Amino acid sequence: MSLTSTGDKLVYLHPQSHTSIRIAMTRLPAAQRREQLLDTAVKLFSEKGYAGATTAELARAAGVTEPIIYRHFRSKKELFIAVIDRTSDLTLSTWERQLRSARDPAHRLRRLIGANPLVSDRGRGIYRVIVQAMMEIEDPEILAALQRHVARLHAFVTEEVVHAQEQGQVSKAFSPEITAWTLMHLGLGYGIFAPLGMPSHAVDSRGTRVRDVVAALMLGDRARQVQDEMLKRRQQGE
């Protein structure tokens, strides 16, 4: 049995009887169809990777024909890059929503430390695509998309650190940029280890979690005093 398309109908052709079955294909507004294709692509790419997934499989999973895909994306690569770009949008909007009710910049940072998209229910799937994309960095366009994704997240975290430093809640011993990179490196490591399900991962026998240690080192009063003293000695030595 083969599949073809006529307008808004999927037509299944039986190879022996030469009969056809016409099944109405739901017409969606362009923006909604694009989002549906992206949602379907996330699942497919996370399971099979960029190289292993095909537009034919995507069409079947989305309940459309391949020409519909190419109305929205010129190629599989363009679709893959669109998934990466949308992951940035979803991550930043999620962070904004989670931080909105925080009482001050320090509280926002504490929440941000715990808001790891790699291990959230929705983020787990979309960030698996990011991990898959890291296997394709020989392609300059995919590499550029990943760099763009990381740069947007780094800019967001850096701005949060800047606000906390301006309020005196985080020491200025280290620049906002390197502090943001540190948080992102730690978050990536946690996101890689967490799915392994290792016993007592990221928590000790007293219940202290990695993010508690990070928060204490960054936002604890004693840690801030030590870092401020280090900054003062550095400035006096210049």
Image: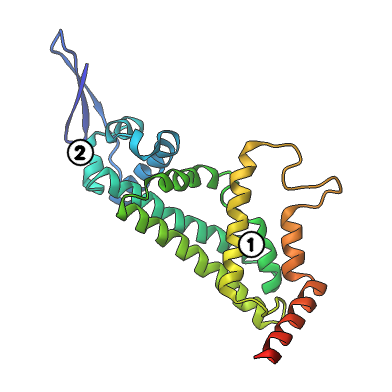
Crowding near pointer 1: few (<14 within 10 Å), some, many (20+)? some
Lower sequence index among marks 2 and 1? 2
Which residue is under mark 2?
67
Crowding near pointer 2: few (<14 within 10 Å), some, many (20+)? some
Amino acid marked by disc 1: Leu
Q: Residue at left 69%, top 74%?
A: 104
Outermost front residue = 237
Tell me if label 2 and label 1 are in contact, CB under 8 Å. Answer: no
Q: Residue at left 16%, top 12%?
A: 15
Frontmost of labels 2 and 1 is 1
| Quarter of the figure that contains the N terminus | top left
Residue 158 on image: x %, y %: 56, 71
| Quarter of the figure that contains the C terminus | bottom right
Where 147 falls versus 234 (above or below)?
above
Specify whether 209 is left or right of 99: right
Outermost right residue = 206
Which residue is under mark 1?
112
Amino acid marked by disc 2: Pro
How much space separates mark 2 and mark 1, taking CA atoms?
A: 41 Å
Secondary structure, mark 2, is helix
Where 29 falls versus 112 (above or below)?
above
Q: Nearer the viewer, residue 184 or 70?
A: 184
